Image (spheres, grey):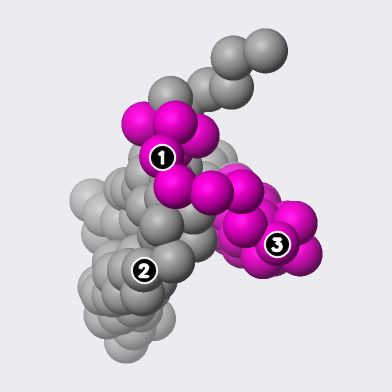
Amino acid sequence: MSRWPRSVYEVGEEPDPRFSLANERTFLAWLRTSIALMAAGIGFAALGPTGNALDLAVSCALLATGITCSLSAFQHWMACERALRLSEPLPSPWMAAILGVGLAVTGVLAAILVLRR
C-alpha cells in the first residue's frame, strides 16, 4: 500500500504513533484557526458598520491571514512528520509569526476604524 505524500512516508522509520497523532492534531488546530479567521473576515465584510475602505481592509487582512495559515498548515505538517521519521529536530513554528503579524495588522486597522468613529 502506497502512502501519500511519498516525500514524507518513503524516508526514515515509522515514529511512535503518539507523535504522528500529535502532529496531526496540531495541523487540524491550524486549520480551525484558519477557518475562524476567514469566517471573521467574511462576517466583517458582510456586517461591517459602514462598508468603507477601512472595513474592507480589516476584512481582507483577516482573510489573507486565514488563507496563509491554511496553505501553510499542510507544509508544516509534512516538515514535522518527515523530521519525526528521520529523528531530526522539529522545524521552527514559522506559521506562528505569520499569524502574529497578520493579527497585529488587523488589530491596527480595527483600532483605526474604532478611533475614527
Q: Position of residue 60 (x, y in %)?
A: 32, 48
Of residues 114 and 6, the one drawn nearer to the viewer in this rendering = 6
Q: In which quadrant of the rendered view does residue 92 lie?
A: bottom left
Q: Label 3, on which residue?
A: 16
Would residue 91 be visible to someone looking at this image? yes
Picture quarter with the N terminus: top right
Give the spatial CA distance, label 2 vs label 3.
14 Å
Describe residue 88's horizontal placement relative to residue 30 as left or right.
left
Would residue 106 be visible to someone looking at this image? no
The stretch of residues the image draws in magenta is: 7-36
Of residues 19 and 32, the one drawn nearer to the viewer in this rendering = 19
User: Is disc 2 surrounded by few (<14), some (14 to 19) or many (20+) residues within 10 Å?
Assistant: few
Q: Position of residue 52 (x, y in %)?
A: 29, 51
* Kind of residue sitting beneath label 2: Glu
Q: Residue at x 49, y 54 (%)?
A: 85
Q: Does the magenta portion include 45?
A: no
- The label on residue 11 is 1
Q: Label 2, on which residue?
A: 88
Reading the chain from its start, which is encountered first: label 2 or label 3? Answer: 3
